[in-house]
Image (cartoon, grey):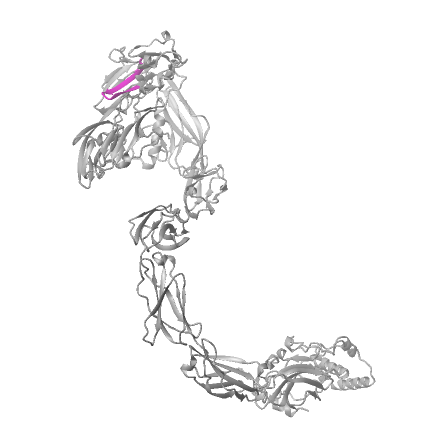
Amino acid sequence: MQLKIMPKKKRLPAGRVALILFLCQMISALEVPLDLVQPPTITQQSPKDYIIDPRENIVIQCEAKGKPPPSFSWTRNGTHFDIDKDPLVTMKPGSGTLTINIMNEGKAETYEGVYQCTARNERGAAISNNIVVRPSRSPLWTKEKLEPITLRNGQSLVLPCRPPLGLPPPIIFWMDNSFQRLPQSERVSQGLNGDLYFSNVLPEDTREDYICYARFNHTQTIQQKQPISVKVISAKPNRERPPTFLTPEGNTSNKEELRGNVLSLECIAEGLPTPVIYWIKEDGTLPTNRTFYRNFKKTLQIIQVSEADSGNYQCIAKNALGAIHHTISVTVKAAPYWILAPQNLVLSPGEDGTLICRANGNPKPRISWLSNGVPIEIAPNDPSRKIDGDTIIFSNVQERSSAVYQCNASNEYGYLLANAFVNVLAEPPRILTSANTLYQVIANRPALLDCAFFGSPLPTIEWFKGAKGSALRDDIYVLHENGTLEIPVAQKDSTGTYTCVARNKLGMAKNEVHLEIKDPTRIIKQPEYAVVQRGSTVSFECKVKHDHTLTLTITWLKDNGELPSDGRFTVDKDHLEVADVRDSDGGAYTCVANTTLDMVSASAVLSVVDVPNPPFDLELTDQLDKSVQLSWTPGDDNNSPIIEFIIEYEDAMHEAGLWHHQTKVSGMQTTAQLKLSPYVNYSFRVMAVNSLGRSLPSEPSEQYLTKAAEPDTNPTAVEGLGSEPDNLVITWKPLNGFESNGPGLQYKVSWRQKDGDDEWASVVVANVSKYIVSGTPTFVPYLIKVQALNDVGFAPEPAVVRGHSGEDLPMVAPGNVRVNVVNSTLAEVHWDPVPPKSIRGHLQGYRIYYWKAQEGSLKRNRRHIEKKILTFQDSKTHGMLPGLEPFSHYALNVRVVNGKGEGPASPDRVFNTPEGVPSAPSSLKIVNPTLDSLTLEWDPPSRPNGILTEYTLKYQPINSTHELGPLVDLKIPANKTRWTLKNLNFSTRYKFYFYAQTAAGSGSQITEEAVTTVDEGKLAMASRQVDIATQGWFIGLMCAVALLILILLIVCFIRRNKGGKYPVKEKEDAHADPEIQPMKEDDGTFGEYSDAEDHKPLKKGSRTPSDRTVKKEDSDDSLVDYGEGVNGQFNEDGSFIGQYSGKKEKEPAEGNESSEAPSPVNAMNSFV
């Protein structure tokens, strides 16, 4: 199956419009190969309206191609231009371009005119447009004397420019003598004609250098008008008036514009106040995307104007006193424009064809035909052509029918000229696309395989795929008229070799091309929007996946331009990092991933934020005595909105350099009404605050000194206290300079007795905050007030404060002092209060002095006794004395206390504390351990707290599994400091509990542990018994052969009596039982014992020091630390209560035969 070229009528998706436009360009660009005979074609020419620089040579371009190469000729102003006769004119070889040398001699004006180029060969002649050559002109302003202009404030004014006519017209602008552009606004603006319009003048418009400049771009020259002087009289402005138009005049006007140009409509009005301009289109709306306002909305511009823009446009000028309008009727005309320009026609002998020339315009253009540059009416007759208006019809053409035809469409606004040739050829097909061209296309995109061809008659095109030449189906592929094969959606299976075949009646040609489908490039991780603070570092990531056979290039752009050439920007693989971010770094950053076939991009915006820039342009207005309005201009918010403004003030008169908070206002405000105090030299500054923090302060405002006034407030913290019994010291917190409200700040201090009828006594003082009144009675209440005053007047009446004159020591001691002993460490004291008048001051409380004394030496040794003091606040008449020592003799007295000090002491009262329980014995040592005895030595308690009655000793054994044996309780006389325990078990550890007693009870206990010494003979016997007893199989054997066991025992006892050793004994000597360790010879201490089964070591605190002495603070062992199931405690008299329970204790060879764990009572009954 073959695909043939034929037009198809079907609806195209919008996404293929660009592709079709591209193919149309390819079709129109098809040309006859240059190796074939063809008529001339103009390829380059100068513009129709050609303005030249008179200071340079004139170059008029005309280039053409053809086979054979064309020759060139020129006409000037409609007649032949003989270039050979003018030595200044030369033609470029192989070209029709003229160069007129006027730089050395000659004038540009000499060569003004209309030029036309003709390119001719044996197949026809092509002609250029009519090229109008004119030299540019930049004439000077005519000399004129300009009179100064004087007018009153508020009048309107028009300063004329009237620039000289130039070619092309100049660009107009107004400047002063310093070449600075004059500022323009809604009130002052430049019109389209160059004049300067003032809707109303102000005194600041006065100047002597209003200068209009005309810039001629073609010659790069600027011409200057004479300066205009304007003086505005600063009188009361004219009365306000409604608007009137300065331009255009009247109520209506007309405007004509050509299609495609820019339509500019202007309305400038005067009035007071300055009018505002609005624009509307009657019976229509202004085009949205083509309408622009210029010159403060005084100029309306519509670009690419068309006939649809014709109509009535209305401008409205409006101010507070009224409004006027002006209607501009717009007509859009059109120079000729192409609807269908004629195209070159290649025919084979005997074929038919047409040339079509269609144009439009307003008015409608006239179409005329030329053949080889000659009007077709007088051109040689050709029987194969027929003219039908804008169409030439050719039938049965022959080689002689070849020619170049010109179509001219013209109206009063211009013309169009197009060349199109008819070339009659007989040529077999040829394919112009290079053989074996490789096309690489991204998957899922269209693939276009070229097959540029030529032949006459026009060949048909067929496409095949693969080596077997399988035909292509037209439901999948699209074949365009220029031979291109389109695969709308290329897939991986579209890869392969494609063959293009071109045929006509004269022959056939074919060409192979190759197609490869590549994976698309994708950005799998796009850069993300970032907000960073100035000075920090930001990173953007852009990860890309692409076809591995293509080369990938990743480029980073900023705002669609190159990255700044700055070392702060670092690109590393798929990352962009910006260090030390600045404000200028904000913007859009784009990652562009390029391969040779496709390109993808992703963008992210970087917002650089920071604290705001400080406000500026601080201004004070509405200055009143106690208020002022402050206004300012906010600084840049640095991309973080301003939340609030903080206003601070400085008082340059009283506290120069110290800024105080005044107020804060919303971030939307730029003004604040500030309350002021009198007699302050204010300066203000403003700080802006956003979410990142506070800006630097603005520059200070101008200073503003408020008028003086009487003080608003009086001193605070007024007090009256005497420092001596006969004075009254009045103190206060003085006013600061800001609060003084005026010069000459003083204080009027007044006082009188509260309970008397005396008049107020007063004194005026300055620069102090204290006044002393002398000769007052002791501790008398006074009424006091302190009033501020200055040179302007007094402050409001002050508040009255109560005070007292000076205190003196109390005169009377408390009476009826009583002591109640609560227990051995606590006593309660009671006393009667002293009479209030005897206190002679503010009662602060009562103070008890107490000390430990010896009976009979109370007075003699008082100076050397350490006394303790307790103070009881206010009028309390009893108190507790804690922390007393038991069994002690104490004395105390009581005194009353006021602000001056203590009064006399009451008579001493003595009392005794009862006995208490003693402290623990100071030490406990165990000395002289033997096989069955231990000796204990101790020191009495450091604090007996009474008379010792006896000592209590409790002890119990500890076996090898840490189980505790029966507890033994022993009473020892109080006069003893040494005791020996006998009949103890050998090689046994004992724990001792020892405490003293008084009549009040038992004191704290001290604990200790010790071990009796080892009997070597008994140890060996016990070891053998243990070894035999632990062999289960041996016990069974003994039961079975009882007789043999009896004989063995007899032999063993005989050997033992003789002192011999069995091998078992030798083994025991080499490996002693780890539960039984001998005493160390070097220090006399016992080695550690442990349970061989559970490996339970004794607590660290249970180890006995080498000197056998145990301090009280180290003796914190508990019976709970030993054995299992211990749940007991000591009662108040120090005796142990509770029971032992749990595992049975392992008895030594000579131990108690009982298998039950004895109770403490049984343990004492069985003690030997």
From the top left corner, tell me how far across and down residue 399 is, in percent. 33, 13
From the top left corner, tell me how far across and down residue 649 is, in percent. 37, 53
Q: Is residue 231 left or right of residue 18?
A: left
Residue 301 visible to an observer of this rendering: no
Q: Is residue 613 left or right of residue 1073?
A: left
| Corner quadrant of residue 722 | bottom left
Residue 633 visible to an observer of this rendering: yes
In the image, is residue 408 part of the stretch drawn in magenta? yes
Q: What residue is drawn where x is 68% and y is 91%?
A: 1168
Report the residue that reaches farthest toward the bottom: 1165
What stretch of residues is rendered in magenta? 397-418
| Corner quadrant of residue 316 | top left
Q: Is residue 820 left or right of residue 373?
A: right
| Above or below, 74 relative to 623 | above
From the top left corner, tell me how far across and down residue 1098 is, in percent. 65, 77
Report the residue that reaches farthest toward the left: 251
Q: Nearer the viewer, residue 227 or 2?
A: 227
In the image, is residue 1084 part of the stretch drawn in magenta? no
| Above or below, 644 relative to 891 | above
From the top left corner, tell me how far across and down residue 245 is, in percent. 19, 33
Q: Nearer the viewer, residue 839 or 962?
A: 839
| Above or below, 55 relative to 924 | above
Characterize the magenta stretch by its predominant secondary structure: strand
